[in-house]
Each structure stands twice: as C-alpha cells, then as structure tokens.
Amino acid sequence: MSLVTEILLRITFCVDLFLLQIVIPLLALLYSPRDAGTHNMSAWTSKMLGYRIHKAGQNTCYVPEEKSTRVMYLANHRSWGDFIVDRLLTGFRGGSLSRIMVIVGIPMPATLAWLGSGQRGTSALWFFKRAKGATPALWATLDRNFEVAIEKAVVVYPEGHRNRSDKPLPIRTGTLRYAFDRNVHVQVLIAEGKERVINEAQLVTRRSPNVVTVSFSDPIVPKNYSTFEGFHGAVCEAWRTTWLAAYGAAAEAGYCAPPPALGPDGMAESATAADHKRIHRPPAAVPWTPPNPGPPPNQHASLGMHMARLCIVGAISAAAYYTLYE
C-alpha cells in the first residue's frame, strides 16, 4: 500500500472517529432525548460506516415467542466494531455485556448507551467488573438488567477479550453457568469482518471489502440438558460449527483466508489435553499462517476510493457542524 493511501486511511479514521464519538451521539441525543439517542446512534453509525451484511446459512436472530424468555447471544469479539455490528444483527434488542473501561475508548457513545433506554427498556451497555471472585457480582448485574429490560436479551463475548486471529479462543464459563442456572436461551452469533468496519489497533475504518459475513446457530435451551457439562458441550459444538460456517462462507466469497480445522470442542485440533484439563474448557488456539500469506482479493481499496470516502465523510462532518453550531 502506498504512503499516500496510508495517510488517507488514517485521515478517514480520524474523521470517522470524530463523527462516531461526537457528531452522531449529539445529533441522536437531540433527535430522541427520551432514550438518550441510543437507538438512532447505533442505526446511524451503521449507515455511516456503510458495511454490507453477507449471511451464511438459513438461521436468523432468535426472538422467542414468549416475551418473558431471556436470551443470551454469544458473539465473537474482534474490535470496537462489535458494539455497532452486533447491535444491528440482533435487531437492537436488549444490551451488550461490557467492562466499564469501554468508556475510556468511546466516552460519549458509551455513556449515552449506558444512561439511555437502549431502545425499549434498559441500558444498551450492561457494565460488569472483571476480577477474580467477581462471579456473584456478574450474576447480580445480569439479574438486575434482565429484570428491567422489556426485551430480555443480551450480547455476551464469551472469549473474554478481543481475538483477531482466525481461530476462536476458549469460551469462559461464567456467563454459561448463569444461563444454565437461570434457563437463559443461548444462540451463537459469529461475524467475520467486524475488524474491517472499525479497527482501532490499525487506526482504520471501512477497509475493503467492507462486508461482514454472519452465521447464526440454532437456539440452545438449557432445560433440555440434565447437566452443565452437557449444556456446555452443546454450546462448544454450536460455537465450532457456526464459526466454520461464517468464516467458510467469507473465504468462499474471497473476504478472508480459509478457516483452519477445528476439533469437536470448538478449538484448534492441535490443542493438547493438558491445556484442556488445566483450564477446564477448550484450550487457546495457536497462531495460524495461511500457505500463501497476503491479503485476499480486493483487500485494499484503490487510492481513488479512499479519496471519495474522505470527501463523503468530510461533507457529512461539515453538515453536522453547521447544523449544531450555526
């Protein structure tokens, strides 16, 4: 990639970040102060970033017939784009479980999402404390937010932190034990390409191809399993098959490299039994390098495309500024 293209990418990221952090939250707050602009903020940000959704398989987002049924969507954690894309994929239902440190990265959107109704009844961000021995506090946070939510749904990232590799990380069991104990229905939601929508590590947005490939599992009902081990095994299998479906479909379309083989526990086949025993859950995957390293077709947009994007976001920024301050 040329130096000029690199510079344009960084400028586009800064402009997008300005729109995401300040302009869109303020406009959404002015337009719908009743819910602190949460719903419009999420919807408008998705439109601004201009990504397309490519769905793999026939399943869609699970919405139970009984409104009182609680649902937990298990999603893969890739970048800041998670909070934007996953909200859209789940129909802006319920909230997202997150550490409070997210406010440091995106202060205004995170604060409004926490304070607002989050589109229909509760905060769009459910903050929790991640520390040793904090499981009771986590369960109390989930109970409290589920109780006040009209649409009782939450997006959870069971890998625990951002994973930008092509293999899934071990699934943490804290929220799964909660789901089993409270009979919270579970659906796995895997999306490939969220890090191309926003990649805060590389200071890039809208990286081509700006496409997110998503796959949904069948819903998993805890009461159908007599033990937690059986329920945990079903979730791991759904995680494995859904991951392969999403990344396989993206690879066929040329959006990413083919996914590696995964074992029946949902992790890399090279994982050792000792690692599994040590953490009582599937072991972490080893880094994988494709046979021919390099970006897939159309990974980098042309110079003209980046200049066009920069002009568009600049025009939006100028219009927003004029609306607010003139």
Image: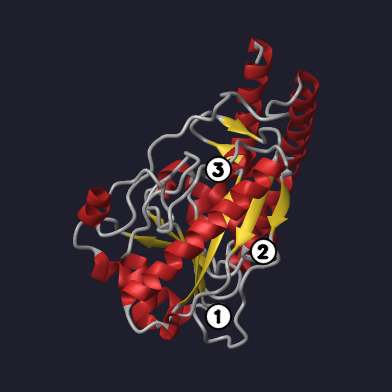
- In this picture, is 45 found above or below 217? above
Left or right of 321, for residue 256: left
Secondary structure of the residue carrying tag 1 is loop
Left or right of 297, for residue 171: left
Label for residue 150?
1
Label for residue 262?
none
- Earlier in the chain: of badge 3 and badge 1, it is 1
Q: Amino acid at mark 2?
A: Ser
Name the residue rendered at 62%, 77% in the picture. 63
How much space separates mark 2 and mark 1, taking CA atoms? 19 Å
Q: Residues within 10 Å of mark 3 (few under 14, many from 20)?
A: some
Secondary structure of the residue carrying tag 2 is loop
Q: Amino acid at mark 3?
A: Pro
Q: Residues within 10 Å of mark 2 (few under 14, many from 20)?
A: some
- In this picture, is 62 found above or below 214? below
Q: Nearer the viewer, mark 2 or mark 1?
A: 1
> Where does label 3 land, which residue?
259
Name the residue rendered at 20%, 57% in the picture. 132
